Amino acid sequence: MEERKVETEKNIVVFEVGGETFGADIWHVQEIILPVKVVPIPKSHPYLEGVAEIRGEVLPVIDAAKALGFGEGSGSGGEDRFMIANVLGQKVIFHVDRVLSILPCPEEETAGTDELTASLEGLVTGTLKRDEGIILLLDLEKLVGQIKQQG
C-alpha cells in the first residue's frame, strides 16, 4: 500500500491595522461583522475598547491598533470591522481597520521569526510573502493571554 504525505495547510484571515498587514489563523475567527456600539468600561485594560452586544451576548472588544502598538484606533474611513473570535475558551472581538481576504497558508511557505526580527513581545509568530507584500502572522492566543495577565 502506498503511503501518502498529508499536506498541512491552514487558512488565515488577512487584515490591516495601522497601515500594516497581519494574518491570523482562521480557526479562531467565527465571523466578521460591521462594528456596533461599544460601551466603554472605566479603569479597564488599556487595550480594551469596552464591551459590545452581539446577538444577546456581551463580548469584550479589543482595540487591535492599541494592542499592536499603533496608539489610538486608527480607523480607515468606514472600512473597520469586528472579528469575532474564540480564543483561550473565550469569545472576544478584535476591532481592526479592515479585513482584506482569507488566504491558504501552506506551512512550508511560512517563515518563522528569529530573535532579531521577533517583535510585539512574541505576538508575531512568522511571516508570509505574497505579491502584495509581507503578512505578519499573529498569535491571537498570546495577545489575549497578555491582556488577561495584565488585566
Image: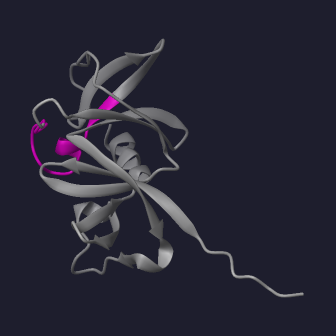
Q: Where residue 17 appears, x then y in whole percent?
A: 19, 48
Residue at image location 23% in from the left, 18% down from the top: 40
Residue at image location 39% in from the left, 45% down from the top: 144
**The residue positioned farthest toward the top in the image shown:** 56
Stretch in magenta: 61-75
User: Within the image, what quadrant is residue 34 found in?
Assistant: top left
Residue 128 vs residue 92, the one in the foreground: 128
- Check the picture and name the quadrant holding the N terminus: bottom right
Q: Where residue 139 appears, x then y in whole percent?
A: 39, 57
Is 112 placed above or below 85 here? below
User: Within the image, what quadrant is residue 41 found in?
Assistant: top left
Q: Where residue 106 appears, x then y in whole percent?
A: 48, 71
**The residue positioned farthest toward the front in the image shown:** 131
Residue 65 is a magenta residue? yes
Residue at image location 31% in from the left, 71% down from the top: 127
Residue 70 vs residue 24, the one in the foreground: 24
Image colouring = one colour
In the rendered view, does 44 fall on the left or right side of 85? left
- Check the picture and name the quadrant holding the C terminus: top left
Q: Where residue 122 appears, x then y in whole percent?
A: 32, 65
Residue 132 vs residue 60, the one in the foreground: 132
Is 55 placed above or below 77 here? above
In the rendered view, does 106 fall on the left or right side of 111? right
**The residue positioned farthest toward the bottom in the image shown:** 2
Residue at image location 10% in from the left, 39% down from the top: 74
Residue 82 is a magenta residue? no
**The residue positioned farthest toward the right in the image shown:** 1
